[in-house]
Amino acid sequence: MNGKQQGKKQKKQAVIPQRDNYSRLSFLHQSSRLLVSTGVAPELGRAYAGTLKTIAKKNVLRLSPHIKRSICRACQVPLLAGITSKTRLVNNSKLQTPHNDILVVECMVCEKKKRYPVGKETGSELWVDKAKRNN
């Protein structure tokens, strides 16, 4: 076989734009969580999380909502339950119906609170989860 025939038989690999940037973001996310959870260098983990957000903005990359929710917006600390954050379920409605439940995540470093609706009947689902379910 000559070179042209050989090239036709090979399958084309899918080209993912900015693959190297996404792999860098993945490394920064994993290492920031590891450094904070083990207590080896929590300030370095905080810096990695800040760098992750900066790189995503400069390269105009869309971060997964799961990654966005795992980093405090105020102080850039990775939010780990029991280590750097407190998580509780709150329902301030008069009837205490389950569709009014709110998940409150509080950063233990800066005491900033993030609130997410998690009621059963809200119908709100992240676009990432919908895409996974449909595929």
Image: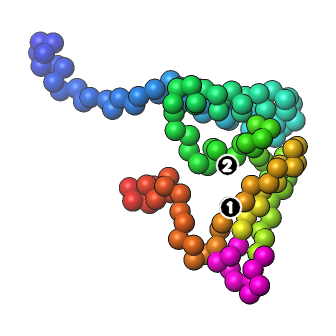
Magenta stretch: helix, strand or loop mostly: loop
Q: Which residue is mark 1?
A: 116
Cα gap from disc 2 to disc 1, whole angstroms: 10 Å
- Quadrant in the picture for the N terminus: top left
Mark 2 touches mark 1? (CB < 8 Å) = yes
Query: Which residue is pictured at 72% across the width and 60% down the height?
Result: 115
Of residues 135 and 95, the one nearer the viewer is 95
| SS at mark 1 in the image | strand
Q: Residue furthest bottom?
A: 95
Q: Is residue 27 visible?
A: no
- Where residue 65 appears, x then y in whole percent? 59, 48
Q: Which residues are magenta?
A: 92-101
**39 drawn magenta:** no
* 30, above or below 107, in the image: above
Amino acid type of the residue that numbered disc 2 sits on in the rendered structure: Arg
- Where residue 10 appears, x then y in whole percent? 22, 26
Query: Which residue is pictured at 51% across the width and 30% down the height?
Result: 60
